[in-house]
Every structure is written in structure tokens, then in C-alpha cells.
Amino acid sequence: MLKSIVRSYIGYTILTKVTRAYIRMLFATINIERYIDQKSDAIITSGEPFLVIFWHNRLGLIPSSWPRGKPLAMLHSSHSDGRMISEAMSDFITLPIEGSTRRKPMNALRGMLRALKKGYPVAITPDGPRGPRMRCQPGVIEVARYTGIPVLPFTCSLRPCIQIASWDRFLFPLPFTNGVVMIGAPIHLTKEDNREQARLLVEGILTNVTNAADHYLGMEPTAPDPPQQGVST
């Protein structure tokens, strides 16, 4: 039903405006604590490009947790729902990148490389847009290996919030709540790194950072989907 609403012009416009207003209210009312690794903090403040990764179920928490005024480019799907989310987050996303690491990988790759070349940090959900939940797909690994740009594992948790029974167990943020942002140590990959080993490394680090944020607020961490089979190295 939601997709049919988004596909209509009136529904798309109304839903975008309502979502944007809700995001602004969240930013104004949520109290966020931040714990950022020193090396990652130095990268963020340097103005140099980097990749920031977070699991797809945290997507709704990003606008209230990413430092306002800090530039951010973000990959989103070319579908109407992806464009709607991108427009609704326009106060926080400086440069939207249309594409998918699965359906339109070359478009996504070119868009990310252009943004990185301009000096933007680029945000990616490694398990998006369709999962498996909290299992890293090859796209972010290839970009990191090809460019040598550091990868910053990012997460945010809020309490209370509503967890939706979607494929990713999406966390829906509520106003007037307390939250925590955690950014782990930067991950550096090179072309010489084994793809599968790098994928598992990134996946494990991001899950550990995410679980740490949930535990900090006394929340039960979301369980990943079963491990993927047959991923090439």
C-alpha cells in the first residue's frame, strides 16, 4: 500500500513533506551522546573523503544522529520510495547518489567515485537495499579496495524506539528519546586484500559496533540473518 501511495504524485509529495517535518522534529527533540574513535574523529574533521557504513535498519536514525552541517553523500535506490527518502532527508544529505550496488552497480560506483573525488564522505548500507540483514554485500568492499579510502563503522541507537517486522528489523525513531552514536576505528583496505576476508572483517566490525550501542542503552541487539553461502573471493 505504501509503495502505491509513493508512486502517485500527490501521495509522494505529501509523504515527503510529512517525513521531512518528522525528521526535523526528531533532530530538535532527541538527546544524543557520541562516542567516536579518535582516529575516525580526525578523519571526519580533516575534510578528506571517507566511506561511512551502517546497517539498513538504522537508516531512520541517521538524520537525528549525523552531525548537522557536516556534508554527507548517500546512495539510494532509483525507485520512488528511495527518491522520496532522499528528498525527505535533504536537510542532512548534501549529495544524493542514485543507484544500487545490486541492480545498477556501475551507476552506483560512478556516483560514489564522483562524490569521493569532490571530497564528500559517502554513506552506504552494506546490507541494503534487500538484505540479507546485517550481512555485508561486496559493493562497499570493492569501493574501499579500489580507492584505499578509509571505512568508518557508524551506528546509532535510540531508546525507546519501535522495531518493525521488516526484512531488516527497521528501527523507527520516536521524538523526545535518548540515543547514542558510536563510530569505531577506521578500516583500511587495499587491492591486495582478499575480498571475502575483507567482507567478513567489515561485517564483523560493524556488527560489534552496532551491538555495543544497543547494549549501552540496555537494548537487545538485532540478530543478523544466517551467513551467506557461496560468496566468491
Image (cartoon, rainbow, N blue to C red):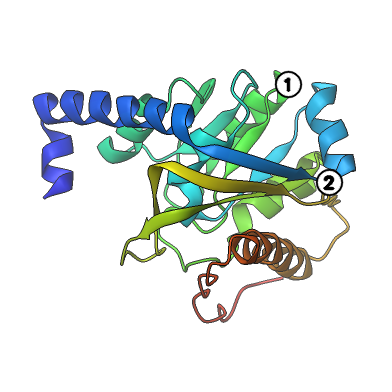
Q: Picture coordinates of residue 135 (x, y %)?
A: 56, 67
**Horizontal relation, residue 63 to residue 210: left or right:** left
Q: Residue at x 53, y 74 (%)?
A: 224
The location of residue 32, given as percent across then percent down, is 60, 40
Task: Tell me the number on the disc at residue 45.
Answer: none
Lower sequence index among marks 2 and 1: 2
Q: Is residue 192 above or below residue 107?
A: below
> Which residue shows up at 75% across the image and 35% down it?
50
Element type at marker 2? Answer: loop
Residue 94 locus on image (x, y percent): 54, 20
What residue is disc 2 on?
37
Quadrant of res 17: top left
**Which residue is disc 1 drawn over?**
119
In the displayed structure, 80 sits above or below 159; it is above
Please report the residue visible at 78 percent of the width from the left and 30 percent of the height from the top: 44
Nearer the observer, 109 or 17: 17
Amino acid tagged 1: Gly
Q: Secondary structure at mark 1?
A: loop
